[in-house]
Image (cartoon, rainbow, N blue to C red):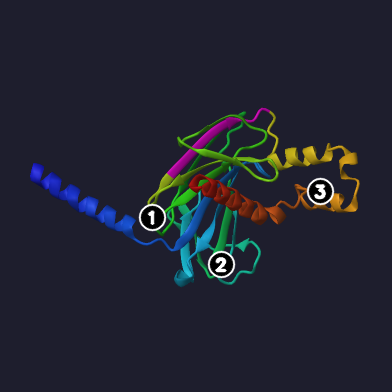
């Protein structure tokens, strides 16, 4: 019996090692979770860079129950902006399944796990059909939230140019089609969205601070209208990557 158990264990360990040793097709990969950003629920952004010699690349990832507004950039047949992404169903689970032809890609969708109370609890199961040598998970701290708790320990934090705070963690790797669950919780007493709070902050800024035409132009460029949030999502994802890159560079120095 002991010999049989040892044999099975060694076989399983060998298969697992071989799976983890597969070369990732990505130069970088970020899983970003933005709770209550511009609508109730969670905005999920999967973004990164595909190695040129692995293009075109088919990406499959499952959608949480009730997910909607699945969009992508860099996919085959799409333009340079976010556009609808193909979704297929296998049993009770829907999957994003698309070929990407550009090195820089972005996949976005929303899901709403919140109950009708002030406590927000989120659980997101991440899975992708390619191995990841290293990847980051980043959670945008909602401006209307408090008492935030994340399932992962030893996290870093960073702020972007808009003053939004992110907590993130770097993971060493993930085998292809291996599920990884992330969860967090917080309270939102008045249910306000981050984009609305940012808009209010801009609206209450003293007008004398922005007298010149050039300054007014700069402020207008960063306004966050609730009726057109997609105009800034790509830029914000780039900002996240830049902030994390600077953090890693400082750490290396």
Give whichever of 203, 243 is nearer the camera: 243
Q: How many marks?
A: 3
Residue 68 visible in rendering: no
Report x, y in % for residue 10.
Answer: 18, 50
Q: Is residue 220 left or right of residue 170?
A: right
Alpha-carbon neighbours of circle 2 within 10 Å: few (<14), some, or many (≥20)? many
On screen, 167 above or below 27?
Answer: above
Q: Is residue 232 above or below residue 164?
A: below
At which x and y percent is residue 215? 85, 50
Highlighted range, magenta: 181-189
Q: Residue at x 58, y 54 (%)?
A: 108
Residue 235: horizontal and vertical position, in percent? 67, 55
Q: Is residue 213 visible?
A: yes
- Label 3 Cα neighbours within 10 Å, binned few <14 / some 14-19 / many ≥20: few
Disc number for residue 177? 1
SS for callout 1:
loop
Q: Which mark is residue 23?
A: none
The residue at which mark 3 appears reads as 219
Residue 23 falls inside the magenta stretch = no
The secondary element bearing badge 3 is classed as helix
Please name the residue shown 64% across and 69% down the image: 79
Q: Earlier in the sequence, mark 2 or mark 3?
A: 2
Magenta run includes residue 188: yes
Q: Alpha carbon of mark 1 to alpha carbon of mark 2: how far?
A: 20 Å
Marked residue nearer the N-terminal end (1 or 2): 2
Neighbours of disc 1 within 10 Å: few (<14), some (14-19), many (20+): some
Q: Main secondary structure of the magenta part?
A: strand
Mark-to-mark CA distance, 2 and 3: 32 Å
> Residue 3 versus residue 159: which sits nearer the camera?
159
Residue at 90% x, 49% y is 212
Q: What residue would you read off at disc 2?
A: 75
């Amino acid at each position: 019996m002991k010999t049989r158990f040892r044999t099975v264990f060694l076989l399983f360990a060998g298969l697992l090692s071989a799976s983890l040793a597969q070369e990732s097709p990505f130069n970088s990969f970020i899983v970003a979770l933005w709770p209550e950003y511009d609508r109730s629920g969670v905005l999920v952004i999967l973004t990164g860079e595909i190695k040129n010699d692995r293009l075109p690349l088919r990406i499959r990832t499952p959608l949480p129950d009730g997910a909607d507004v699945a969009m992508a950039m860099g996919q085959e047949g799409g333009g340079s902006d976010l556009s609808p992404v193909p979704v297929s169903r296998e049993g009770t689970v829907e999957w994003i399944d698309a070929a990407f032809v550009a090195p820089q890609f972005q996949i976005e969708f929303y899901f709403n796990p919140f109950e009708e109370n002030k406590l927000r609890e989120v659980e997101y199961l991440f899975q992708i059909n390619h191995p990841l040598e290293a990847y980051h998970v980043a959670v945008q701290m909602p401006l209307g939230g408090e008492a935030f708790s994340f399932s992962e320990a030893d996290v870093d934090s960073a702020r972007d140019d808009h003053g939004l705070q992110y907590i993130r963690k770097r993971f060493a790797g993930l085998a292809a089609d291996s599920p990884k669950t992330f969860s967090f919780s917080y309270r939102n007493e008045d249910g306000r969205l981050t984009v609305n709070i940012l808009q209010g902050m801009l609206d209450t800024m003293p007008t004398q601070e922005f007298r010149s035409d050039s300054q007014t132009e700069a402020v207008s460029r960063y306004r966050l209208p609730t009726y057109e949030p997609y105009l800034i999502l790509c830029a914000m994802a780039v900002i996240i990557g830049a902030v994390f890159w600077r953090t890693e560079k400082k750490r290396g120095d």
